[in-house]
Amino acid sequence: MRKFFVFLLFWSRFACADFPFRAIPYIPAVHASQAIAADIDQDHVPDIILLEGFRIAVMKGNGDKSFLPPVMLANLKGFRAIAVAQLNADTYPDIAAIEKDHGVLSVYLNQGNGTFFPLREYKLRGLPLGFAAGDLNGDSIDDFAIAIDGEPSGFVQVLLGSTDGTLMDFKTFTTPAPTSVALGHFDQDERLDLAVTSFHEPTVAILRGNGNGEFTSLRKIAASAGANKILSCDLDQDGSDDLVVLNIYNQVVFARNTGNARFETPRTFQLERVQDAVIFTHTGQQHPSVLVRDGYQDIVIFTRTPSGYSQRHFLFAGSAAMAAADWDGDGQTELAMSVSSYIALIETEGNRLLLPRHLNFAVAEYIVDFNQDGHEDLVGSGFLLLGNGKGKFKKERLRFDTGDFVRPIFINDDAAPDLLIVHFYRDTTFRLNDRNGSFGSEHLFPYGYPLDGVLKADLNHDRHNDLITLADLGVFILLGRGKGMFADPMKVPLFCDPPLVYDLDDDGQLDLIEPCFDFVALRYGNGDGTFQPEVLLNDEIGIDNPSASDWNGDGISDLLLLGGYDPGVADLFLGLGGRAFDSPQRYAAPYLPIASVSADFNQDGLLDLVVLGDDSALALYYGTGDRSGRSSFTEPVFFGAGRYFTSLAIGDFNEDGAPDIVASSHEPNRTVLFLNRK
């Protein structure tokens, strides 16, 4: 037996021209709470800086929507926020951070090659809550204005930069309970001014910059109490910076500057759970937009209009870390958003996010032709969708109770799939198909729950459909007798989880493959509905959802086991024939991999693999055709759609000959269609 153990690293380039699906690239990164776009090495390609608790990750952009692995800048005390600033006389942007629980400003000076000098720390006069960087005294070196916590009155501390990268504690300005600061041109001169929010007062203090690092109190404008972030930007392009304030009451407050630091009555918008916001300008867009992360699922885009502000809502699950740039040099701006341990790159058009197609219904796990019209249909939790062959569906109005789960089943021996209805509050029933997309009356289904993934099975080769069901900690085999009649059930006890049904030894008989955390139990079929005693295959990875196919094209079935946590792994056991398997090839997989599907997605004649993780990411592995047992797949390319999926299925929904993927999620009930563009 050959012994190979392969582990493939997962930093790979997302080649959009070759990638088969209309999807969003997911770049392996860190669990980020803040993201900033900056050209760290001055190569005219944007890079991304990510904050993850005690670490700052700097990822150099390649200019094609891919990034190099992160360079980590650590601090054992933990950071609250980061900023990019020009802190010495060179041309390379530096990184600064305020600590979460200590009165310290940390500075990492850029060495110019994508790396940074050791950390410099500056003691502050209190606990920092927010800060902003800009040239406050006209020497072309950035300075800092820092909101320092205080009850009932705190203050803003100003630190001035110098050409050698050191900072000088310059002055403080008292303000009531400051929480965040923003720098901008509010009074139409060339000097930066300061806006400071207050936790207790429903106002923003505007301080006029004197051009030497000092500020003069100008006025207070109405905003909101409980403010925790402020942004400045010229949203209406009239030459004066406007203000956007976020508060703990999940409100977004817009204050329009009419000139000379005079602001209109603010406009307030109530959202569900405001987390953060960024300013975003798309190429060719007349006005900048404000992107607000609302909860973990919703992005709200506000754009200034002649009559006020427009809103557009987009479903995309992720964290509050967002940054916008032209990451691939095509002249169009993309939004980078942290999703679990990835960065998702979302294309935009004006004030729209270009997301994969979402279908507004619940989980879709089965693809069959219910009405026998030659087009693939979808069925899932309480719905039936009839396909038209063009990637679109018509919802069939069937009455199901709330919580019902619906799946196809073949009760009799005709070609039309029937409906099995697993009721939330009562017994499972079925309805026979009349072959035109409608169904007869309900009948009791007394045989337990049919095994997932098994629609048709003729275990004893008598041309009658047999049923494999789950009940009472076992698998039950019901041999069909035709016309919807079945023999008495035969029980096969289970060790752990429901098995996969597949002809693993290629003898023409269906076998049972049962995952049991650190081993799989293989029960080979006898061809009469019974099975041989189990054979155990060990693989201590926390096995979940095995799958089988002939991935290397040698005519012998192979076995894929998913497992692991962070990171996940996919172990491929190539079949050697005679019920023997090679040592596994190990591939990096998404966090907690839970499902997989296989097809020739890029239409090169080789079988590919897609693995779904519990962190919303999907990983595509291209088949290599290698039969040596060394590497049957390429390293994975990660993608997604901003949903936390629970299941995958394959179909050709637009009937172009290329396999598509449908991925479904429970919360909220959404199904995403990844159409193949090959």
Image: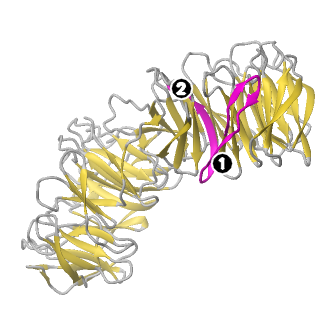
> Label 1: few (<14), some or many (≥20) within 10 Å?
many
Q: Main secondary structure of the magenta part?
A: strand
Reading the image, the residue beneath label 1 is 251
**Image mark for residue 61:** 2
Q: Going by the image, does 327 lie left or right of 419? A: right
Q: Could you say which quadrant of the image residue 648 lies in?
A: bottom left
**Of callouts 2 and 1, which one flags the residue occurring earlier in the amino acid sequence?**
2
Q: Going by the image, does 177 lie left or right of 388? A: right
Residue 594 vertical position relative to residue 180 in the rendered view, above or below = below
- Residue 507 shows in the view: yes
- Residue located at (42% from left, 44% from top): 640
- Residue located at (71% from left, 38% from top): 265
| Residue at the far bottom in the pictured view | 488
Magenta stretch contains residue 381: no
In percent of width and height, residue 169 lies at 91, 27
Element on which disc 2 rests: loop
Q: Nearer the viewer, residue 581 or 613?
A: 613
In percent of width and height, residue 605 lies at 20, 38
